[in-house]
Amino acid sequence: MQKFICIGNLTKDPDLTTTNSGISLAKFSIAVDRKFKNEAGEKITDFFNVTAWRGLGENIAKYCKKGSKVYIGGELQNRSWEAEDGTKRYKTELIASECEFLDNKKDTEENTEGNALEPIDDDNLPF
């Protein structure tokens, strides 16, 4: 079992797409600063590619933008494939299972201006 958690800032706006079967996913990357600095006293930053599926991905795409600070929890996934030139390629990405938006309320309101939540009819809820 594995669990990966980090806090960082989106490096670009999330890219929301759907699969051929209609499942939505958001892809983005986050910059995460390490606790320590290098020998020159500079911050060290790691960059992680993130994929968030279904409703989680839709919410991230709706409420986050480049620079948004988020907490992301999930699992690391390694993939490999053979490129056209015959070389073996590898990719590690974070598959998000949870996300918390850490920007202050004012930043969030500015990002969602005009995107008010729609009311839900309680009679149509499955629970």
Image (cartoon, helix red, strand yellow):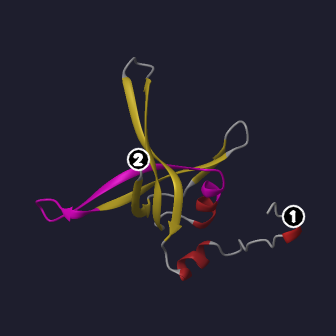
Contact between marks 1 and 2 (CB within 8 A): the answer is no
Label of residue 20 in the image:
none
- Which residue occupies the foreground of this view, 125 or 101? 125
Majority secondary structure in the magenta region? strand
- Which residue occupies the foreground of this view, 46 or 55? 55
Q: Is residue 32 magenta?
A: no
Q: Quadrant of residue 44?
A: bottom left
Can residue 121 be spotted in the picture? no
Q: How far from the left and from the top, in percent, is residue 32?
A: 35, 60
Q: How far from the left and from the top, in percent, is residue 75?
A: 45, 47
Q: Amino acid at mark 2?
A: Gln
Can residue 53 be spotted in the picture? yes
Q: Which residue is mark 1?
A: 124
Q: Which residue is mark 2?
A: 2
Residue range in magenta is 34-58
Query: What is the quadrant of the N terminus in the image?
Result: top left
- Which residue occupies the foreground of this view, 41 or 81? 81
The crowd level at tag 1 (other Cα within 10 Å; few <14, some 14-19, many 20+) is few
Q: Quadrant of residue 84?
A: top left
Identify which residue is drawn at 81% across, 73% down: 119
Say left or right for 114 vs 46.
right
In the structure shown, which secondary structural element does the residue marked by tag 1 occupy?
A: helix
Identify which residue is drawn at 53% across, 78% down: 107
Q: Is residue 53 magenta?
A: yes
Q: Is residue 80 above or below residue 35?
A: above
Say left or right for 122 vs 16.
right
Q: Residue furthest left?
A: 39
- Which residue occupies the foreground of this view, 120 or 114? 120
In the structure shown, which secondary structural element does the residue marked by tag 2 occupy?
A: loop
